[in-house]
Image (spheres, rainbow, N blue to C red):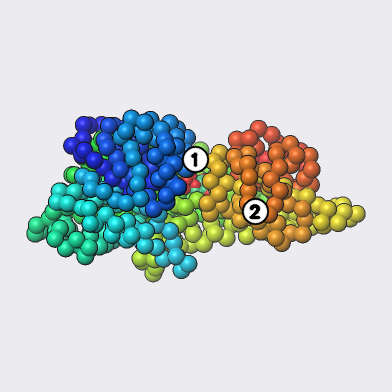
């Protein structure tokens, strides 16, 4: 970490990545102007509170606001560096939606001045950083943007530095992780390294913008392909009557094998999304990456079928019970263990589908959530254990790992009860 020459940094988009990043700069005594279109988020932050759940973030933001280093607003203001951390969701056709990046870029363009640095942090398809430079050029034609060959005059520095932090570990990983920094030209990379060294203890590694964009997509696609392999193994093992968890842990004892864990599917807003950015750019070439997405996307349907078969089996064993008298308990709704995040959660999707189609009573346990807007009952662990006929384990929250239920009818997607 080094003293920084940046007096004021503006972070555009105060979500899961932007807000912790803003607070981190502020903790290094840099003046931070956070910008967000969401008035509620802006007001909450200015009161020293947070509108998202992430361990230790509330403390960091509270301290930064109290010390006067962090302030939020809905309108961009001049600064020395601008960091864009807005969402890049998918459109219906699996094409990346760059409209938030475009809106953020166009919003800051009028306040940019000579010598400013603009960093795109949002996960982006290859070419997006160059597109940001083009948008700035269109909106502020008096400012010369850098070019890839470093030829000609340049008034700005523009770079891509993808966020790579793990939800639930953001505060620690922001400081400790290495950063990949890809400027449109070499000068932009250098300038961005100076900025991040204000709080990053990991290495800041320089590359070009396209490679930095692709590096982030590659990391998440690697994980997606590996999980797809595990999910495919789980389906194969089910047919061959082999315990897939045992199989994977045995295989992983080989020094050069590291298979991830199967589950009910892949959720969250990153791994289930980012590989499509590669597929959409090079559809003919990205065959394995597309197949992994499809394999992981098909897993919830497979789990639902397993539960259906389990219900039939149960009804055959208890012929006096009617279908509507059978209680199915789903354990876990979040997209991964020990968090409360329901975004793109396969567990939530499976539970909702079971509620809609199974014809049984479906209840759910989610220790990290108190209220749910969906139309099924949320119960505590004890109630689920005592009332349910069939247990469906969807998320390996630590609370569920403490017990090994002895009932006969279990569908365990995480291999902790079977
Ligand atoms: N999952 C499995 N099996 C596993 C591991 C995960 O089924 O063995 C599932 C999880 O249950 C979840 C999904 O995959 O549904 C994604 O969870 P995750 O923990 O793999 O990843 P995210 O989405 O929380 O965060 C990822 C991280 N990327 C990598 O580890 C390469 C994080 O570092 C990125 O910053 C983040 O994506 C992002 O923002 O892109």
Distance in Å between CA atoms under marks 1 and 2? 20 Å
Pointer 2 residue Cβ closer than 8 Å to ligand 1: no
Q: Categorize mark 2 by other alpha carbons within 10 Å: few (<14), some (14-19), many (20+).
A: few
User: How far across and down, in percent of the image, does residue 395 sit?
Assistant: 60, 44
- Residue 374 badge: 2
Q: Can residue 390 be seen in this view?
A: yes
Looking at the image, residue 280 sits to the left or right of residue 7; the answer is: right
The residue under the point 33% across, 37% down is 70
Q: Residue at horizontal 45%, vertical 57%?
A: 273
Residue placed furthest toward the right: 320
Q: Is mark 1 on a helix, strand or loop?
A: loop
Left or right of 6 in this view: 414: right
| Residue 316 left/right relative to 15 | right
Residue 84 in view, yes or no: no
- Please identify the quadrant where the N terminus is shown: top left
- First along the sequence among labels 1 and 2: 1
Q: In which quarter of the image is the C terminus?
A: top right
Q: Name the residue under label 1.
A: 53
Marks counted in the figure total 2
Displayed quadrant of residue 300: bottom right
């Amino acid at each position: 970490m080094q003293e920084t020459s940046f007096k004021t940094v503006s972070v555009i988009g105060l979500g899961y990545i932007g807000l912790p990043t803003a607070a981190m700069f502020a903790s290094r005594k840099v003046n931070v102007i956070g910008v967000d279109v969401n008035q509620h988020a802006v007001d909450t932050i200015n009161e020293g509170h947070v509108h998202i759940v992430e361990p230790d973030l509330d403390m960091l933001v509270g301290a930064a606001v109290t010390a006067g280093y962090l302030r939020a607003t809905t309108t961009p203001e001049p600064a020395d560096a601008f960091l864009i951390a807005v969402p890049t969701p998918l459109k219906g056709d699996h094409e990346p939606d760059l409209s938030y990046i475009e809106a953020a870029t166009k919003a800051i363009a009028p306040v940019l001045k000579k010598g400013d640095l603009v960093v795109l942090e949002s996960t982006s398809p290859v070419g997006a950083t160059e597109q940001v430079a083009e948008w700035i050029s269109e909106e502020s034609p008096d400012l010369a943007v850098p070019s890839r060959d470093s030829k000609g005059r340049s008034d700005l520095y523009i770079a891509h530095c993808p966020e790579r932090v793990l939800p639930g570990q953001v505060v620690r990983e922001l400081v400790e992780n290495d950063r990949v920094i890809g400027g449109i030209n070499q000068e932009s990379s250098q300038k961005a390294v100076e900025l991040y060294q204000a709080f990053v203890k990991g290495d800041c590694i320089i590359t070009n913008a396209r490679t930095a964009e692709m590096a982030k997509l590659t990391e998440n696609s690697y994980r997606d392909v590996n999980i797809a392999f595990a999910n495919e193994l789980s389906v194969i093992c089910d047919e061959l009557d082999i315990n897939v968890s045992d199989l994977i842990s045995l295989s992983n004892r080989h020094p050069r094998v590291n298979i991830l864990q199967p589950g009910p599917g892949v959720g969250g807003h990153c791994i289930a999304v980012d590989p499509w950015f590669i597929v959409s750019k090079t559809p003919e070439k990205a065959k394995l990456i597309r197949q992994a997405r499809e394999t992981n996307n098909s897993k919830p349907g497979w789990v639902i079928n397993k539960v259906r078969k389990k219900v039939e089996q149960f009804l055959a064993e208890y012929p006096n019970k009617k279908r509507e008298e059978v209680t199915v308990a789903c354990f876990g709704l979040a997209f991964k263990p020990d968090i409360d995040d329901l975004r793109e959660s396969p567990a939530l999707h499976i539970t909702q589908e079971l509620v809609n189609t199974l014809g049984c009573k479906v209840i759910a346990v989610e220790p990290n959530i108190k209220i749910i807007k969906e139309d099924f009952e949320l119960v505590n662990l004890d109630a689920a254990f005592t009332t349910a006929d069939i247990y469906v384990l969807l998320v390996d929250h630590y609370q569920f790992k403490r017990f090994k239920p002895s009932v006969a009818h279990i569908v365990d997607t995480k291999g902790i009860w079977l």
